Amino acid sequence: MAISWKSFDFFEVAQISLPDEETQQLFASNDVSSLCTGSDSLFLGSFTGWVSIIGKSWKVARRFRAHETGAITQLQQVEGTSLLVTVAEDGSSEPALKVWALDKLVKKTNLPTCLSTVNISNGLRQFPISAFAATDDLSQIAVGFANGAVVVIRGDLVHDLGTKQRIVFESEEPVTGVQLATDDKITTLFVSTTSKILKLGLSKKGQGLPPKTVEDVGCAVGCMTFDRNTGDVVVAREDAIYTYHLDGRGPPKAYESPKSLVAMSQHYVAVACPPASSNSKDPGAMRRRFGSSTTDAIFNASTFVVLEPDLRIIAHQETLISPVRRIFNVWGDLFTMTDEGKIFRYHEKSLQQRLEMLYQKNMYPLAVELAQNAGMDAQQQSLIYRKFGDHLYQKSDYDGAMLQYIRAIDTTEPSQVIRKFLDTQRIHNLIQYLEQLHEHMKATSDHTTLLLNCYAKLKDIDKLEKFIKSPGDLKFDLDTAITMCRQGGYYEQAAYLAKKHGEIDLVVDIVIEDSKDYSEALDFIWRQDPAVVCYPSPSTMRVHSNHNQAYGCLDKYARVLIENCPEEATKLFVDYFTGKYKPRRTVIAVADSGTPSSVGFAAGAASAVQNLSNLLPLPYMNPAAIGSSGTPGNADATVSDGPIVIDDEATAPKYTPPPPRAAFSSFIDHPDEFITFLEACLEEKQLNTSDQTDLYTTLFEMYLYKSTEKKGQQHREEWEAKAKKLIEGEHVPMESSNVLLLSHLSDFRDGTVLVKEQARLLFDIFRSYTSAKDTRGAMKALRKYGPEEPQLYPAALAYLTSDPKVLEEAGQDELAAVLAKIDKDGLMAPLQVIQTLVGQSSSGVATMGMIKPYLHDTISRERKEIAVNRNRIATLRTDTEKRRTELTDLGTKPAVFQATRCADCGQGLDLPAVHFLCKHSFHQRCLRGGRAEGEVECPKCMGDNQVIRTMREAQKERAERHELFKGDLEASEDRFSTIAEWFSRGVMDVEQKTE
């Protein structure tokens, strides 16, 4: 099918006004035999062998004679160098090829230097050159002749180191074109004749490969050129434009018209079309209608066309009366030269101008291709897509419009597009656009909300799952997506998103609050690592900043989980708070199929699903869910059909458990689970004092709480026994006030008694029994604590005589025993006993018969004590009188010494002798010490005297310490005796006071 070409005017055409007469004469004289461009210059060859170099100002910059004879039929300038190749023919000799160095001038002539000269041999056959081509380094030159021969010249023409020529191809048809295509390995020569296109490889040694026919259709002279941008050979025929490359022929671009000349200008193909042989069925009629001269001009007019083959655009087309003789590119523009010597410049319009032409005709796809070929950046291209989308939207082509809007998504405000597709009938297009917004990371939370609402409206769960499970980075606002899924009832999808992005607390929220699947929520929490399992206590929160997630979930939903999964939830609390927590890991047991490959696969599969907490949607531990966990490629019967095994042998990770008190509030209204938790925590040895206190106190309270349940006396006694056993242990870190308070609130007397006993509050224990009228308990406490606390007996006496019922319950024997103990230990004076009994006698409890034995024994004992005291007084008085008489005699009467021996040495006394009033006599020489005569003391009595003096000094010193006297007096049971004793020590000594 013929290609439909679109005609536009992409070029501005202007005739070149030649600046001086010399240039005008050069072009007008029709003396230009050849032409080439290069190195920012235009080179003209003449029929007389001259070369003219034209500058950008269209003035002749230099002119020199390159050949003495013949016309210069071929010119080629090596781009980027100063080398120029000229070929001249005179028809009588072999063509001459010269290489010129334009920058090297001969000093004498001031002309360019000719580097080398070669005569082109055609086997001594004189035929004109019809085609010419050279490589950029001039190492190979191909020359085609009208007799069908192609000569290849190889060598170093630049340095004139010699060349070799060889006819590589001969045919019966004339050669119309030659081109050289070079790659890294070999140079390929394309040859065109009037009947075929061939190619043959040229090796470095000059040996050519056999010619290979590329196409059995040739081309006219001037209709083959080389596209330097693509490396393709371009051939123009009447039916189309063809391209050939090293691998074969490219797709032709049909354009039917006679063609006489072709040239490449960037990505354009410039074609000169001669007049057709017959443009009308009746040329004579046309001549008669318009006149002979006018019709001849019309029929002989030629056409110049500039094609853009890739876009199928006729970029410029014009009819010329004077045919185009030359087409060339120089100074960034396309030029033509007509037979009349006129020069026309074709300047390409700006890209924006060309695009505007396409916009006017609504040819947006063509505009996009044009922009891409021109290298326009993606942002500018998106403007074209948006215009194209607006155009299609106006034509009600919503699908096509949406496709263009998506292409322009990077530069288009999303709201402009979304407003156009809010209609329910266009919801699929809206979904498509919103999805692409997320893919391009352009979506906001509002876009996510709108997209999920669209999915929900269509109930398209497959698309919803595909959207939230899309691989790669997160393309939407996570919180918004989770919220919308929860609101729409897509709980599994919401849980998947939360789990995938590490929102552990949200997963638990969804499973508990929305799905109401408490066991799955608990199992999910149990699979978390301890580093993300527990919030720390407030005091350690700054240190353990990574302790989070699962205990936060437990703290929030503990009551719900314990209510619905009491046993498992309590076990999780126990494991975590006792430091024994181990995240659950699940492996899949895969049956051994017996083949090595299956064994390897099973091991890989088991490793791949080591942690099943990564498998969603919920439920996580459902084997069916594992088997269908997403794409079919991930499912395998060997893995999904295997039994699930919980790996409990994994090593427990190290972490710091939070204080148990943090979990107490979670067990409200669940006393049995709470007691299990507390007992398990108390079994741990590494507990600090505060935690132990909390655990003991709370567990004691829970025991008492259980005992108050109305389930019978046996139930009460069982729990009270546990409570009593708890506080009976040694070093129980419980405050007595707490135990007393809890025992009182629960009416647990054993607890009260035990605490008071441990605190040695024995009197309070007895008083608690008496206040409760528990006579049996009071007597039991009296017998148990009386030896340690004697004052209990007076209290017991008062209690027993307080009420006839009490006395009757206790019995008179108890009263007699109490009185006996009081009397034996002297706990009360008899008067105090009588006052106690009299004080209680108003009730008629104590009778004279009950106290008569006590009074009889007391009076008899006191009478005996009085008699003993009187005898002692008489003895002391007699002894005192005797001492006084002795003292008087010593001071008033002479002493008679009758000792005859020395009391020290035992020998008979002789003078000088010393006699003491103690009746001891000594030789003077036997007296020791160097004291004065008046100070000599009896050696025999000196020790006793010293003791007496020491005791006296001690008495005097002690008598001055009144605080000791006061202390003894306050602590004494018999203060009179205490005063008498201190009186004997001299505390009341009048002489001392006087001094």
Image (cartoon, helix red, strand yellow):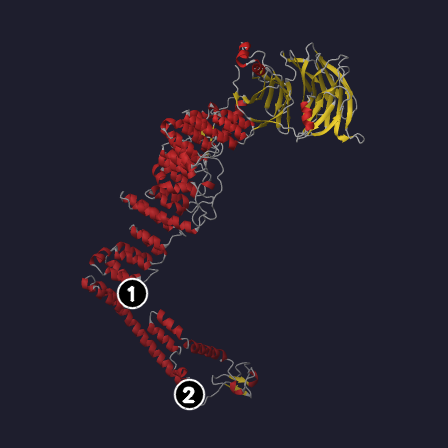
> Toward the viewer: 695 or 548?
548
Where residue 775 appears, as percent x and y from the top left, is 25, 55
Asked if residue 254 lies left or right of residue 657, the reply is right
Q: Is residue 725 visible?
A: no
Where residue 185 appears, as percent x and y from the top left, is 69, 22
Disc 2 marks which residue? 889
Q: Quadrant of the C terminus?
A: bottom left
Q: CA distance from mark 1 to mark 2?
A: 50 Å
Where residue 401 appears, as percent x and y from the top left, is 44, 27
Choose top left, top right, bottom left or bottom right for residue 981. bottom left
SS for callout 2: helix
Checking the image for residue 823, the label placed there is: 1
Where residue 643 appears, as percent x and y from the top left, is 44, 27
Asked if residue 956 lies left or right of residue 854, the reply is right
Asked if residue 470 lies left or right of residue 269, the reply is left
SS for callout 1: helix
Height in image: 898 above or below 409? below
